[in-house]
Amino acid sequence: MSPPNLVPQPRSLAPSTGDLVVEGAPSLAESVVEGLDAEAYRLVVDPDGATLAAGSVDGLVLGRSTWRQVLDAATTDGEGRTVVPGVRIEDAPAYAWRGLHVDCSRHFTPVAELEKLVDALALHRMNRLHLHLTDDQGWRVEIDGWPRLTEVGGYRRRTLVGHHGSAEGPDAEPTWTDEPHGGFYTQDELRGLVSYAAERGVVIVPEIDLPGHMQAAIAAYPELGNLEGPVEVRDVWGISDHVLAPTERAFQLVRDVLTQVIAIFPGPWIHIGGDECPTVEWEASAQAQQFMADRGLTSERQIQREFLTVAHEVIAGAGRTLVGWDEIVEADPPADAVVMLWRPGADVPLAERHGLSCVYAGCATLYLDHYQGDPEHEPLAIGGHTTLADVYGTTELPADATERQRALLLGVQGQIWREYVPDDEHLEYMVFPRLCALSEVAWGVRTSYEDFVGRLRGGHLARLEKLGVRYRPLD
C-alpha cells in the first residue's frame, strides 16, 4: 500500500515492515518517553499495531494529528477488515511558533468560527491562534469596571463599502452600509475558547493594541484621548490619529485591561500591538507636552515607551512575556519582549540588532488578506498579491543566517486582517488553502511546490471539506 498524503510533510516518512490489518477501528498505543524533544514524536504502524511515542503531551497531540491523516488512507479488505498503511514516521517541528493571526476587530469573528479555525490549526500541527481583539473599529473583549468599552466601543454605526472612493476616483465620496456592526466576547466565552484550543494543542495569544489603534476605547471614554470633544468608533479603515493620552486614567486602563486579559488567557504571551502609533495629537496637546517635560522626555515617540513600560510591568509581573509588532523596537522595548516582524525590511537581523526573540510575519507573503489571483475574478481585498506558491516560498530567514539569528527566530505566523473580509465564508476563502502552505513553512519541511499541490489534490483538500472549511479552489 502506498504511504498516505500528509500535510505538513513529516521530517521522516518511510514504509514499515507491513500494513496493519484489524477487525473494526484500529487503536493507537501512546506513551511519553525520554530522549525525544517536547514536540517530537515517533509513529509506527506495522502488523503488530500502531504506537505513538512522544517527548511530552504536546508531542502526543501532534502525533495524533498525523495518525488521523494516516487513517484517511485506510482501506477495507475482502474480509471487511480495516487495512492501515504501514509507516514509520519520526517527526519534530523546526519552529516552536506556528501561528495564525485573526483580526476580530474590523469584523467580529464568532466563537464557533474561531473553534473551526482551532480545529484546522490542529489538523496542520500549528499551535498559536493570535486574536486581534481591539482596534479603532471595534473593542471585542469584556472588561469589568469599564462597561462602555463593549457597550459603546464594541459597535460602529456603519461600515465602509468597497475601497475608499476607488470606483470613481480617489476623491469620490465613500459609501457605507446602512446597519451598525459589532459584537464582543464575554470573559467566560473566551475562557471556553482557551480550553477548547488547549485540548487541541493550540495556545491563544490575545492582543490589546496600544497606545495607538485605540479610537474605539476613546469613543467609549473620551477622557482617555487627547481631544476635548468626543469621537465615534471609526467607520473607515486606515490609521487613526486618535491615541491614548499620557494620563493616569489611560495608564490605569492599560493596567486594568491587561490584568483581566492575563486572568482569561493562561498562555505565556500577551500581545500589546504597538504598531502604527501617530504622534500628531501628542505634538499638539499641551497636556502631553507637560507630561514630556515632567518625565524629561525629548521626543513624542518616548510617550509610547512610557505606555510600553506600564504594559511590561503588568505582563512581566504576572510571569508572562510581552509581544509586539516590530514598531516597538522604536520605543526601547524590554529585553525579554518578542517582536513580530511584519513590515517590508523588518527581518531577523533587525530583531538581532535589538537582542530580541522574534516571529516572522512578513507582509510580502504572510498577509492572507491580499488578493490570491486576478482582482477582476477575486472577492474585494485590501490589495497586494499573495498566491499559494508565494506563501510556500516564504523566506523567513536570510540565506546566510547566523546561528544566533536562527536561535532568535521562534517561528512564523500568517495574518488575516478583516477590513475587506466581512463574513466567515470569506474568511475561510482567504485563509485556505494558503494556511496549508504556511503549515509546511512553519513545520520546516518543504519538498517542492509541485509535490505540495499534489498532496493537496491527493487527499488533503478532502480533509478541509470534512471540517466544513470553504477554501478557495486550486487554480
Image (tube, helix red, strand yellow):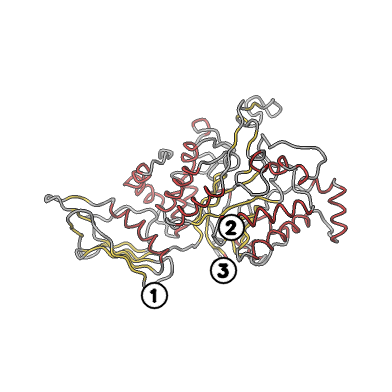
**What amino acid does circle 3 point to?**
Thr
The percent coordinates of residue 419 (x first, y second) are 59, 38
The percent coordinates of residue 364 (x first, y second) are 57, 48
From this viewpoint, which residue is outermost toward the front? 145
Q: Earlier along the polypeptide chain: callout 2 or callout 3?
A: 2
The answer to which image quadrant residue 231 occupies is top right
**What amino acid does circle 2 point to?**
Ala
- Name the secondary structure under disc 3: loop
Name the residue at 77% across, 51% down. 249
Of the pair 388 and 78, the residue shown nearer to us: 78
Q: Nearer the viewer, mark 2 or mark 1?
A: 2
Q: In which quarter of the image is the N terminus?
A: bottom left
- Residue named by callout 3: 402
Total label count? 3
Q: In which quarter of the image is the C terminus?
A: top left
Q: In the image, 245: left or right of 436?
A: right
**What amino acid does circle 1 point to?**
Gly
Q: In the image, 224: left or right of 59?
A: right
The percent coordinates of residue 149 (x first, y second) are 66, 43
Q: In the image, 331: left or right of 151?
A: right
Name the residue at 38% across, 75% down. 34
Q: In the image, 61: left or right of 393?
A: left
- Residue named by callout 2: 263
Q: Nearer the viewer, mark 2 or mark 3?
A: 2
Give me the C-alpha separation between circle 2 and circle 3.
38 Å
User: Residue 406 shows which numbered tag?
Assistant: none
- Residue named by callout 1: 35
The answer to whether the residues at label 3 and label 1 have Cβ atoms under 8 Å apart is no
The percent coordinates of residue 443 (x first, y second) are 44, 59
Give me the C-alpha separation between circle 2 and circle 1.
34 Å
Q: Residues within 10 Å of mark 2 (few under 14, many from 20)?
A: few
Give me the C-alpha separation between circle 3 and circle 1.
27 Å
